[in-house]
Amino acid sequence: MLRVHELQKSFGGFMAVTEANLAVDQGEIIAVIGPNGAGKTTLFNLITGQLKPDKGRITFKGQDIAGLPAYRVCRLGISRSFQIVNIFSRLTVFENVQVAVLAYLKRTLNLLRPVKHLAIRETKDILVNFGLMDKADRTSGSLSYGDQKVLEMAIALGNRPELLILDEPTAGMSAEETAGVIKLIHRMTADLGLTILFCEHDMEMVFSISHRIMVMQMGRTIVEGTPDEVKNNPMVQEAYLGGEEE
Amino acid sequence: MSIMGSMSQKRWVWGLALIIVLPALPLFLSRFYLYLLALIAVTGLLATSLNMVLGFGGMYQFHHTVFYGVGAYAAALMLTKTGLTPWLGFITAPFVSAMFGLVMGLICVRLSKLYFGMLQISLGSLVWAIVFRWYSFTGGDDGIHGVPIPDSISSAAGSYYFTLAVTGASLLIMWLMVNSPFGRTFQAVRDNPQRCEAIGVNVKRHQLVGLIIAAFFGGVAGVLFVVVEKSVFPDMMFWTHSLEILIMCLLGGWYTFLGPMLGAAVMVTLRSLVGIYTEYWTMVLGIILMLLIFFLPQGVLGFLLDKLRPDNSAARPEEV
């Protein structure tokens, strides 16, 4: 579904991504792990069009998407959430998701119809799924951090993506909230047939839910394989897991 | 719920009162006060049109009065230099402003935030300079005086009614736009343009459309200015005037729909009153601005709505 081939990106003289390779197939849950500064977020930004790659190929369902602007990548069926909370803080929870649905329905340039009656059912479905319905009318900026991270994901679903990219979905969450997110991810793949690509520092979560794992170090893909393969790989143990697992 | 209910009930009472009182005013008020009210309506419409992009789109539109000036000059020139019916001039002028908004927007929306605003000031000042110097066409720094307005709307009461009707209709259309899918998306662009791109919104295109809408209604305000003043002059599109309009939006509350109208009412009234006692209007303006920044960062209406709301969150347009 998604193929990343020898992707490269530098900022000034700093190579953030030197050589990233990644393959994601329909229905998979893929994790990208690596130490801080390994280039995970940059990789995601390159895939979803927030950044333009210097070199390399990105194809989605056979189509070359490298360098497309973010809104066009999104329209092809790739949605994402962000590492830092990135919501519409003055809009209500309902409106946050509604805007994404409106964008999916291509209604955002409609000037005179009352927005009150548009995309209501789709928006409510998503809010119910994410357990945000009781907070629908709250201003999103006033939500708790955990709820804002959940809203992050809810917004990303407004576009009915095929591939959902989550940048550290549980960062800063309590154990309880993390469990909730894991449940959500399972539900999204099972019920909606979503393919999920995510990065995360919580190794327990990564190894429990992902089908395959890609390990990055200093902007380079060093290993890509099943959780067991990755766990037993000497390069990974040295580079990354070693310190943490002892 | 009960608070919301009583708020929307109150809104209707206020609306009804305005609909009865405003048209009856010419029976009681002198020419001067009718003129003042018409000027408030014109300035308020201008501020509201600016707020479409400033408050609801988060665009730093620092030189909005260019569109006001272009609309006013377009109307005045058509009325004085052509034999066409004046009404045609009134209708065409806002479209000239909108076209102008399109051209300026195409150049400016590539840049974001402050850079957008700075480029707009530069381009706008260029337009001002052309108008200021082109004596043979625009009348230069003298402007154009004695614009022939149709008899039916040239009297104090006539221009008051005309201004009131057009302002009311324009506000209604803008209100519908704020509460349309475009309006909601535009507010999302204001809150977080990067996230908007990520959910499939072409941010620059929405900003361009917003700017054209704002320019159009700025042009409508320009036409009304010609009707009320029967003259135009280049200072109406000087950049300091744009700042004054911007301050009106901030004073009234830029996240509210009617805030800019309220801000315009306060500032236009104050300027007329202060003008009787002192010529240092800008000093008073400075003091107002300081008080505003320290005590009412959300503006007067934003502050009041905040106090009335149960969860103390930011004011929402459809409740104003």
Image (spheres, coloured by chain):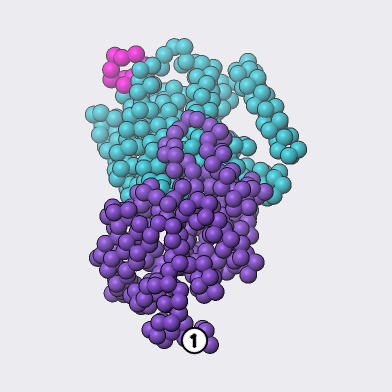
**Chain ID at mark 1:** A
- In screen coordinates, is A104 left or right of B84? right
Label 1 belongs to which residue? A243
Q: Is residue A242 above or below residue B276?
A: below
Q: Residue furthest right?
A: B2
Identify which residue, B301 or B315, lies in the foreground: B315
What quarter of the picture does the C terminus of chain B occupy?
top right
Q: Residue at x 61, y 48 (%)?
A: A128
Position of A20 relative to B150 (above/below): below
Specify whether B215 is left or right of B56: left
The purple one among the chains is A
Q: Residue at x 35, y 23 (%)?
A: B92
A142 in the magenta segment: no
Q: Residue at x 71, y 43 (%)?
A: B308
Q: Which residues are magenta?
A: B78-86
The picture places residue A161, in percent across and down from the top left corner, at 44, 50
Q: Quadrant of residue A124?
A: top right
Inspect the image, locate mark 1, and give the three-letter code of the amino acid beneath it: Gly
The chain assigned the colour cyan in the figure is: B
In-front residue for pair A133/B161: A133
Is residue B79 on the magenta stretch? yes
Residue B306: x and y in percent read 66, 47
